[in-house]
Structure formats: C-alpha cells, structure tokens
Image (cartoon, coloured by chain):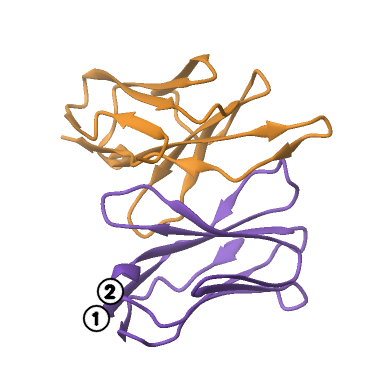
Chain colours: A orange, B purple
Amino acid sequence: ETGVTQTPRHLVMGMTNKKSLKCEQHLGHNAMYWYKQSAKKPLELMFVYSLEERVENNSVPSRFSPECPNSSHLFLHLHTLQPEDSALYLCASSQVLGPPYSNQPQHFGDGTRLSIL
Amino acid sequence: QKEVEQDPGPLSVPEGAIVSLNCTYSNSAFQYFMWYRQYSRKGPELLMYTYSSGNKEDGRFTAQVDKSSKYISLFIRDSQPSDSATYLCAMKGTSYGKLTFGQGTILTVHP
C-alpha cells in the first residue's frame, strides 16, 4: 500500500478512444502531480495541482487534460492519443507547507500502463 | 546536455557486494537531492532525502552529495537480492521547486 492509488493499472486503447485515468491519495496531502515515464527516459512532469493552482509543462499536448476536483482526487482525461503516448503514467502527491512555502518529498502510486494501438 | 546524467546500467553484482550508484548534474542551483527505488511494475519509492552537501546514512544505505563536483552517490552495503530494482536520482533547486529526475540505473543483485 503506497497511500496513492491509481486505476486502472493497465489500459489498452485505440487512437480514437476517450478514456480517463484516476488517482486517489489517502495521505492528507495538498498537492498532486501527473508524470509520464517512458522507457530509457527520465520521468517527465506533466501537470501539478498545488496551492489551488494548476501548473503545466508546456510541452504536453492538448490531448491530455487533467482534472483535480479536490485535494484527494486527480484525473487525466485522454483523447485522440498517438502511439508515442504509450507509457507508464504515474500520479504523485506531496504536502506543501507554509508560507514560506516548502514542499515535502513526493509519494508515488504504482502507475497506469497505457498502450495505444 | 541533460540537466541530470545517470548511467542506466544495467549493473549486476553478487549478494553482499557494496553498490555505488551515481548521478552528475549541471545546474548549480540544485540543493535538494533524493534517491528513489522503483521495483518492476511499481511506482518510485523514496529512499533518501538530503539537503546541500554531506552524507546521510539510513541502515544499509548512504547518500553522499558533493556540490563542488555536482555529483551525488548512493551506496548500498551488504546488498541483497531484494535490492534489485531501478534507482532514480532526483533533485531540485528550492524546496518548492520542480523535481528533475535522472534516467535511472537498473540494478540486479544475484544470489
């Protein structure tokens, strides 16, 4: 049990499908993140929700759309994905303290393995 | 040039060996350094968290930071087969900053 639960664990979808990834954290944290992990590449930060703000990596395509309805739940909506989007998608959470603001270490879920046909 | 360089390995060692894992970085603003362990089909798990230079020890694990050389290390003493995993280094410049990860080193400890 990591305290961060991601569903589904595996997802296979066609390029024209729409699906959503879900993340729930039980750690009482107030910041949540989406990362993409591809083979032989460093983790790539996609989106952050922290201090009621959304921060995004400008290189993330618009076919990925995050939603954070509250501090415990995070979604990643997917539509019209490409084969290069096949990867492990990791959710993480952390506790932001302050002001002055400091961020405790991030805790990760076990990811959703996404395969695009 | 990547901000964080980490040899992907794979690294294979016999049980009981001392393992040394390393990362180099180019951004002198990095002050917070982490090591994560990631087992197959699992998410990264925080192992060590250090601030600025120096050593930190936790059981069989020692994290070392040399800011003058922009070099960090993780040592594993008396390595066990259960230590077989991918080890990721990560760092940031401020406590509230974005984490930058290395590529990860695949470690196998064989009995």
A54 left or right, relative to B95: left
Screen quadrant of the C terminus of chain B: bottom left
The label shown at residue B110 is 1
- Chain of the residue displaying label 1: B
**Mark 1 → mark 2, Cα distance in angstroms:** 6 Å
- Dot 1, crowdedness within 10 Å: few (<14), some or many (≥20)? some
Q: Residue at x 28, y 74 (%)?
A: B81
Circles 1 and 2 in contact, beta carbons < 8 Å: yes
Splitting the image into 4 quarters, where does residue B96 fall?
Answer: top right
Q: Secondary structure at mark 1?
A: strand
Amino acid bearing label 2: Pro
The label number, if any, that marks residue A58 in the structure image? none
> Residue at left 29%, top 78%?
B109
SS at mark 2 in the image: helix
Which mark sits nearer the N-terminus, 1 or 2?
A: 2
* Percent of width and height locating residue A90: 40, 39
Q: Three-letter amino acid code at disc 1?
A: His
Viewer-proximal residue among A60 and A88: A88
Considering every residue shown, the one lying at the far front of the view is B59
Q: Which residue is mark 2?
A: B81
| Chain holding disc 2 | B
